[in-house]
Image (cartoon, rainbow, N blue to C red):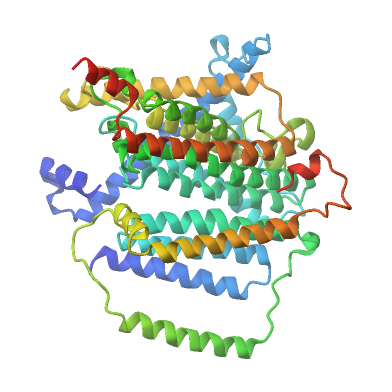
Amino acid sequence: MEAAALSLMNAVPLLAGVPLWAVTLLLIVAAAAVILVFALTFEGVGSLVLRKVAGDIQARIGPNRVGPNGILQFLADGVKLVLKEDIIPANADRLLFKLAPYFVFVGSFAAFVVVPFGVGLIAADLNIGIYYVMAVTSLVVIGVLLAGWASNNKWALLGGMRAAAQIVSYEIPVGMALIPAVLIAGSLSLQDIVRSQGGLLGIFGWNLFHNPFTFFSFFLYFTAAQAETNQTPFDLPEAESELVSGYNVEYSGIRFGLFFLAEFGDMFIVAALATACFLGGWNVPFFHVGTLPWIWGNLLSLGVFLAKAFTMVLIMMWVRWTLPRLRVDQLMRMSWKYLVPLTFVNLLGVSLWLLVFKGKGIPGMIASLFG
Amino acid sequence: MSGPADYIFYAAAAVTVGAAILVAILPNILYAAVALLFSFAGVAGLYVLLSADFLAATQVLVYVGGILVLLLFAVFLSNRISDAKITNPTHFRLPAAAICLVLFGVLSYAAVSTPYAVKEGVYLPTTADIGELLMTRYLLPFEVASVLLLAALIGAAFLSRPDRAASVKGDMEEGKR
């Protein structure tokens, strides 16, 4: 950020008298605002797409009243959430009840900071990128637990407990399934991981096709991440038919809106991490985006990244409306008896592969056969 | 060090210490847990200020994502959840104060007298160096710590295991962690 602030000050003579830290602060606020606008738009449109996909899969029409074909439904929903009365139950713990949605939203939104949207489009290219995402999203668990307890409602408490148990359990396979991408790139930075999948191999340069273990670990990641974000078939914390709505049952108005936004934010983060770590990120096949003029290179890479990420989001919605919900014990068994051991074996496999073949993937070896 | 970095240091230190004091004096254990969250966040902020990015993220991941969640879990799973309002009473104030004073003296003496290896200026990534040191020079402490954690895990699994003879073997028992 400071380097960007320096170049901005050199470009705009008017800023010469302003201290460096002020310009840096301004840039940070601007970047946060851009990401917030993107996140809110995605979350709004995402909710409409989710309902439309649900309608299609369940052979019904879905929202169709607001605007042509119902495409303005998300605006109506947003206005409703903002204007609705903010009810706090009489026996709730007022302070924690008010605080909890912010923890959830901050934990989800902070992860957007390191999402590599394009060749130069990243709010902060932290060199601990993936690790940072794992760290800040742990705030979500705290928020969910506190929301469940502060509501003073047995369904909310059960939902909160289930959510925390689930997120804590599935954090391990999610992290372990992402490590192969870190190993191949030799860096935790998401930009470095995306760059390591570029080059002349096209889509075969993606980590997905690097070797059999990375191919497998993509699916392990996707399954575990689906559970970590509390999506059906792992939506036990919400489970409308048994817990009404789980930890957020007592919330209304904008506080419910924050939970809702965080849920869609998590969905995008999962899709973005899958894209960046396994599907080549913003790399355009057979083409170096960095050689284009800054604006076109960024626009093109942004388009490629969003196309991949949105496809992943659509697949998540598809899975969500297709599979039935697991039971609590099945959910825990799936994590601890299958996903955790499998991701460890997989990690060992990738490490051995990188050691034996000196970091080369199958497509790379085939390419070197033909010179 | 001068300029905004100084103010950020004082802000982070104030959050850390203030939240820690709240943890000690709040009667409601859940409020104390939330105060603890802010204390952890303050320490993470100090790490960020010192360019220790990996340590900062570890601080958040381990303490907020691990220890604090387990703490809340333990409170929720206890039988007295309905009267969780007053679960953090204060006992033995004088001995506690004495121990705190001694500990404060030792820690501050250590903090002041340690010759730190200070690197001026540039910010460098620390992750690779930490990993290399853990795998080479500090391999033994690293492995000993992991054996200790393994022992704790096995102990916890043994203690929480349902009595095989008495329990009816079923899906619900198998699913329990």
Q: x%, y% of residue A223?
A: 56, 30
Q: x%, y% of residue A245?
A: 72, 36
Q: Is residue A364 left or right of residue A253?
A: left
- The residue lying furthest to the front in this view is A356
Q: Is residue A158 left or right of residue B114?
A: right
Q: Is residue A325 above or below residue B60?
A: above
Q: Nearer the viewer, residue B134 or A61?
A: B134
Q: Residue at x 30, y 59 (%)?
A: B51
Q: x%, y% of residue B10?
A: 36, 70
Locate residue A334: give its quadrant.
top right
Q: x%, y% of residue B42?
A: 44, 64
Q: Is residue A326 left or right of residue A183?
A: right
* Quarter occupied by the C terminus of chain A: top left
Q: Residue at x 35, y 26 (%)?
A: A280
Q: Nearer the viewer, residue B168 or A123?
A: B168
Q: Is residue A130 above or below residue B154?
A: above
Q: Residue at x 29, y 30 (%)?
A: A360
Q: Is residue A93 above or below residue A217?
A: below
Q: Is residue A2 above or below residue B87?
A: above
- Counting the numbered discs, the total is 0
Locate residue B140: give its quadrant.
bottom left
- Specify whether residue A303 is in view: no
Q: Nearer the viewer, residue A24 or B165?
A: B165
Q: Nearer the viewer, residue A159 or B163?
A: B163
- Specify whether residue B84 is in view: yes
